[in-house]
């Protein structure tokens, strides 16, 4: 079960978010500002933070900069009443992974949380083995025991790693875009089709897996071990 930390100086907001998230079976901790959030993290493993910007003692920007300065790559969803592009830019410069403006659409927030947790899972496992094929996340290499190896561009590797992590599962182009390129990306979903085509060409002679199109739905990986 994922553990989420809601950081907001408004008690009503904290409790509303707690109720929404607990209804989705998340374990939820709360804090009234950045300093209190750091204290929670001293005693609890947290998988993702939902973070307000304007708070006393330590605001959302400072909290995020503190984590990133200490090489903590915990997923952060920043939520703020500030709606100017500059405010969003400041959030991303500080190191947030995603940004939403208040009032928050609850369904959209849950979708963004799911995407952030998926991306964190991709990067945390670091290596994936499919029969005689090994995908190494640190080097973006896909290799076989016979010595054959490819080093892929980052997005190609992450796309292949994602599909092979869930063989048989269908992912829509939008799901793959949100997870690999990010919800805020201006890149069109067509780029997924382009990357899939490149991967198919690169691994056409590898019998351990294949990437399939599912008409009207998206893509899935099939493995043969």
Image (spheres, rainbow, N blue to C red):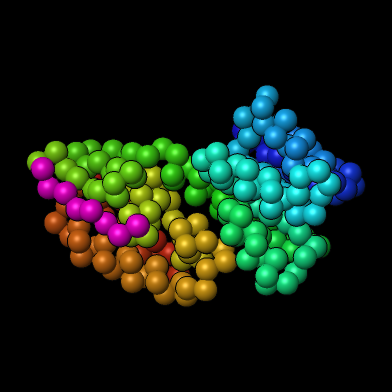
71 above or below 161? above
Q: Measuring 74% from the left and 63% from the top, which residue is drawn there?
A: 101
View extreme (left): residue = 146
Instruction: Identify the magenta region.
Output: 147-154
Residue 26 in view of the camera: no
Location of the C terminus (image quadrant): top left
- Give the image quarter of residue 18: top right
Residue 122, position as x, y percentages in the image: 44, 45
Q: Nearer the viewer, residue 209 or 148?
A: 148
Tell whether 137 sits left or right of 118: left
Residue 23, position as x, y percentages in the image: 75, 42
Residue 173 in view of the camera: yes
43 above or below 170? above
Residue 54, position as x, y percentages in the image: 80, 54
View extreme (top): residue = 43
The reply to whether the magenta stretch includes residue 149 is yes
Tell whether 181 sits left or right of 210: right
Residue 121, position as x, y percentages in the image: 48, 42
Tell whether 209 sits left or right of 18: left
2 above or below 12? above
Q: Nearer the viewer, residue 70 or 209?
A: 70
Q: Measuring 50% from the left and 45% from the top, which residue is drawn there?
A: 120
Q: Measuring 26% from the left and 61% from the top, which residue is drawn there?
A: 199
- Give the image quarter of residue 30: top right
Q: Measuring 37% from the left and 60% from the top, which residue is drawn there?
A: 155
């Amino acid at each position: 079960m994922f553990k989420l930390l809601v950081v907001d100086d408004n008690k009503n907001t904290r409790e509303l978010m707690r109720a929404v998230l607990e209804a989705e079976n998340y374990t939820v901790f709360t804090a009234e500002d950045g300093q209190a959030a750091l204290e929670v993290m001293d005693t609890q493993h947290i998988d993702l933070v939902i973070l307000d910007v304007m708070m006393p003692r330590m605001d959302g920007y400072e909290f995020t900069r503190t984590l990133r300065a200490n090489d903590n790559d915990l997923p952060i969803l920043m939520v703020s009443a500030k709606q100017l592009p500059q405010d969003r830019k400041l959030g991303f410069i500080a190191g947030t992974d995603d940004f939403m403006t208040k009032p928050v659409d609850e369904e959209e927030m849950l979708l963004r949380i799911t995407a952030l947790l998926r991306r964190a899972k991709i990067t945390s496992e670091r290596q994936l083995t499919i029969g005689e094929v090994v995908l190494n996340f640190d080097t973006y290499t896909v290799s076989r025991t016979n010595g054959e190896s490819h080093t892929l561009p980052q997005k190609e590797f992450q796309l292949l790693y994602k599909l092979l992590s869930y063989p048989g599962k269908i992912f829509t182009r939008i799901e793959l875009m949100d997870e690999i390129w990010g919800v805020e990306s201006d890149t069109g979903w067509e780029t997924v089709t382009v990357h899939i085509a490149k991967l198919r060409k690169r691994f056409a002679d590898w019998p351990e897996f294949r990437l399939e199109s599912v008409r009207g739905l998206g893509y899935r990986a099939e493995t043969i071990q």
